[in-house]
Image (cartoon, rainbow, N blue to C red):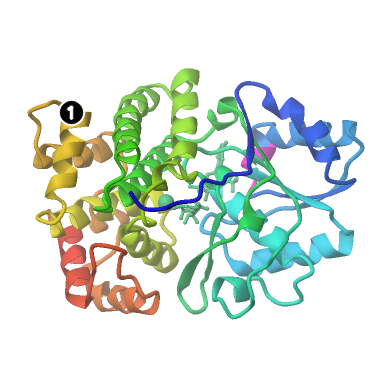
Amino acid sequence: MQNFTSYNPTKVHFGKGVVEKLGVEAAQYGRKALIVIGRGSVKTNGVLDAVFKQLETAGVTHVLFEGIKSNPIYQDVDSAIAVAEAFGAEMVVAVGGGSVVDSAKAVAIGVGAGHSVWDFYTRTAPAPTKGLPLLCVLTLAATGTEQNRNSVIQNDADGRKMGYSCDAMYPKVSFLDPEYTVSVPANYTAYGISDLISHVLEQYVEPTDSPLSNYIATDIIKLAFEHGRKLMADLTDYDARANILWLSTMALNGTLSAGKRGGDWGVHGLEHSLSVLYDIPHGAGLSIIYPSWIRAFRTELEPKLDFMAKRVLSPTATGDDFLNELEGFYKEINSPTRLSEANIPVADKAKILENFALNKVVGGFYKMDEAKRAEILDLAWGE
Ligand code: NZQ
Ligand code: ZN
């Protein structure tokens, strides 16, 4: 087991109606809030109205920044920062999925910085030591951003999608109401399940021995299969929504990295290139890459896959059984498993490989050179 520091300052309110605590929580941080939202879902499902009501009752005035796109871009964040500065915002309230929350995290550290937020992501500006307090009303189960210090945004102009992590980006409070996720359509529900599974795998496959993390990882995968199937059969199933939501938070809030050395994250690197080049949903890119990445590292992964198979499937199951189950599960929930399903043509291979190189996609423990990355792409185009 490696040395580690366990620290997660985000308070989580979980369950039906928890937004009713938003006003009291927000009032602790000031009287002026910038609210950040995406492209309208929170207006149609009533979540934004509930947030307005809470802030108004608590005497917190607000200004709205809307239009954050899925796979968010730094230019929108810079625009939101300008609005926050002009308004004198004392806090940021994110209402939406991972793209909105990640953008709001970037706004929180960018206000008052005096430069584009992208400079943090490219590491050309010094790390921030503080940021505006962030409150997060999550509406989509997937990324785990609601209880972690990470944010991922992209620069479409130069083809880079980059993650950034700092303590100032931990939300102060997150409100996780499973009912707020009921309006997520089937496709994004499936991509969210794919994303949460991938977060577990990225950390689990690391060879470092950390038994408790390994056991929790296998249990999260098992429950994600079980509740994922229930949820895809009935998108209004509250219990399945609640389980998937909490599983996705737990998959990336530090629990699984205890005693480890940070995870591999090679598949995420490969996927981020697909998102920036083709604007495909993150979870869809992950379900395309994961089976091929596992096939490419099948020998090295044997002990990890074997343990996972025995814990998730049966005492006699093998690593291949787990791979088949994983790929079969993606197909069952209609998350793609081949590049062709996302209309990414073989003719683009050189362009994609170039983007992998630009984004320095190598993986933490299972190292990928150009030939390995090409092999994974070929597998992902295969039948
Ligand atoms: O824009 P709106 O109208 O809100 O619609 C969104 C968007 O079209 C919609 N949606 C969200 N909640 C909804 C809803 N529709 C109906 N009802 C609701 N309740 O869903 C679509 C996708 O939203 P998005 O926020 O993009 O999805 P997700 O939560 O999967 O976030 C993806 C982003 O997070 C990054 C990804 O790379 C991607 O950019 N990640 C962030 C991580 C982190 N911060 O720790 C880790 C992840 O690995 C990931 O990289
Ligand atoms: Zn992810």
What residue do we see at 31% from left, 25% from top?
226
Can residue 362 be seen in the rendering of this structure? yes
Where residue 12 sits in the image (x, y, percent)? 62, 34
From the viewer's perspective, is residue 302 above or below residue 268?
Answer: above
What residue do we see at 21% from left, 65% from top?
377
Does the closest atom of ligand 2 sit within 8 Å of the Cβ of label 1? no
Local SS, label 1: loop
Tell me the kind of residue under disc 1: Leu
What residue span does the magenta drawing correspond to? 39-43
Q: How many marks?
A: 1
- Compared across the picture, whether 181 is left or right of 258 comes to right
From the viewer's perspective, is residue 297 above or below residue 248?
Answer: below
Front position in the image: 243 or 187:
243
- Compared across the picture, whether 287 is left or right of 94 comes to left
From the viewer's perspective, is residue 77 above or below residue 29?
Answer: below
- Residue 154 painted magenta: no
Q: Residues within 10 Å of mark 1 (few under 14, many from 20)?
A: some
From the viewer's perspective, is residue 155 above or below residue 315?
Answer: below
- Compared across the picture, whether 219 is left or right of 34 comes to left
Where residue 110 sits in the image (x, y, percent)? 71, 66
Q: Main secondary structure of the magenta part?
A: helix
Residue 267 falls in which quadrant of the image?
A: bottom left
Where residue 152 sits in the image (x, y, percent)? 52, 60
Can residue 97 be seen in the rendering of this structure? no
Front position in the image: 258 or 378:
258
What residue do we see at 17% from left, 75% from top?
371
Residue underneath mark 1: 313
What residue do we see at 19% from left, 71% from top?
374
Front position in the image: 183 or 211:
211
Where residue 112 sits in the image (x, y, percent)? 79, 69
